[in-house]
């Protein structure tokens, strides 16, 4: 059976991916910071690794200690990421900006770099979680959206570099998915409830099912990028400020 490593597995899309892939018969390596939540996922098919993905030494030690049959990673799902704050750039926290870059960009490329030789050897796959924020600017998106634009472009350039290896790379770009994500960003469950009220947003399980579909397509097919939104979400025209 193939093995998938899922980062950010303690909640939301990551947790849903662990369940979906394990139920489909995969071996799953679930990583995240919250050991108590990971413990609840552990099973014969799910091996858990508790570490902060931004910690180079912890990440390297955890990956080096993977037991059989979890040691050979066929698919990497780069799901770990976060958004902090909705302030305009001129009012935003530099610490928040650095945390988003360290998590969404630096840690993502580091774990990809670590696992890439094995994925190439096994003609495996990489699925990166980007966002519609990579494609549609919005007030307060600033650095978060920039990190997701990086993830999208990094995915496409990985495809270019991996041409001829048989490795598949996909950028998944969801819109509104109701998870803990917005609560973390705003610090308020009430704000999250207000955002999603009446929208009928996508769920973590919707996205996990999509990732499983991408992962199990015939080996000669590659989904380069896939943008998903709930039916009740779309986009608006340009903003125009009129002086006067």
Image (spheres, rainbow, N blue to C red):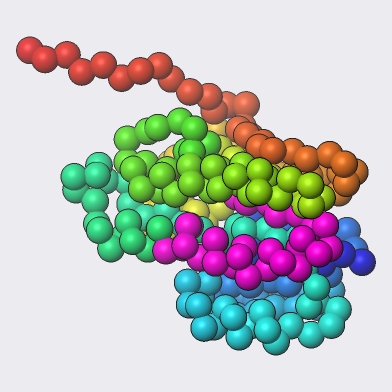
Q: Nearer the viewer, residue 131 or 209?
A: 131
Image quadrant assignment for residue 163: top right
Q: Position of residue 4 (x, y in %)?
A: 77, 64
Q: Nearer the viewer, residue 219 or 4?
A: 219
Q: Does residue 29 show up magenta in the picture?
A: no
Q: Position of residue 28 (x, y in %)?
A: 78, 69
Q: Position of residue 215 (x, y in %)?
A: 80, 50
Task: Say if 149 sits above or below 29 in the image.
Answer: above
Quarter of the picture holding the N terminus: bottom right
Q: Is residue 234 visible?
A: yes
Q: Does residue 104 show up magenta in the picture?
A: yes
Q: Is residue 171 visible?
A: no
Residue at 88% over, 46% down: 219
Q: Nearer the viewer, residue 38 or 227?
A: 227
Residue at 59% over, 80% down: 60
Please provide the residue range marked out in magenta: 102-130
Task: Say if 22 sits above or below 210 in the image.
Answer: below
Image quadrant assignment for residue 14: bottom right
């Amino acid at each position: 059976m193939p093995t998938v490593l899922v980062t950010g597995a303690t909640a939301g899309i990551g947790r849903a991916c662990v369940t979906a892939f394990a139920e489909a018969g995969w071996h799953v390596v679930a990583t995240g910071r919250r050991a108590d939540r990971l413990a609840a996922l552990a099973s014969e098919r799910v091996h858990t690794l508790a570490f902060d993905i931004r910690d180079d030494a912890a990440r390297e030690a955890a990956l080096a200690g993977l037991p059989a049959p979890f040691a050979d990673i066929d698919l990497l799902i780069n799901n770990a990421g976060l958004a902090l704050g909705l302030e305009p750039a001129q009012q935003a926290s530099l610490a928040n900006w650095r945390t988003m870059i360290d998590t969404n960009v630096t840690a993502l490329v580091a774990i990809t770099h670590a696992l890439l030789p094995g994925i190439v050897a096994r003609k495996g796959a990489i699925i990166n979680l980007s966002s519609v924020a990579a494609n549609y600017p919005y007030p307060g998106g600033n650095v978060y959206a920039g990190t997701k634009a990086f993830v999208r472009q990094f995915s496409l350039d990985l495809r270019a570099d991996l041409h001829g290896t048989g490795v598949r790379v996909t950028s998944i770009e969801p819109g509104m998915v109701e998870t803990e994500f917005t609560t973390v960003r705003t610090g308020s469950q009430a704000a999250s409830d207000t955002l999603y009220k009446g929208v009928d947003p996508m769920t973590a399980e919707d996205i996990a099912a999509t990732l499983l579909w991408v992962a199990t397509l015939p080996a000669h097919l590659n989904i380069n990028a896939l943008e998903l939104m709930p039916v009740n979400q779309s986009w608006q025209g340009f903003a125009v400020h009129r002086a006067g």
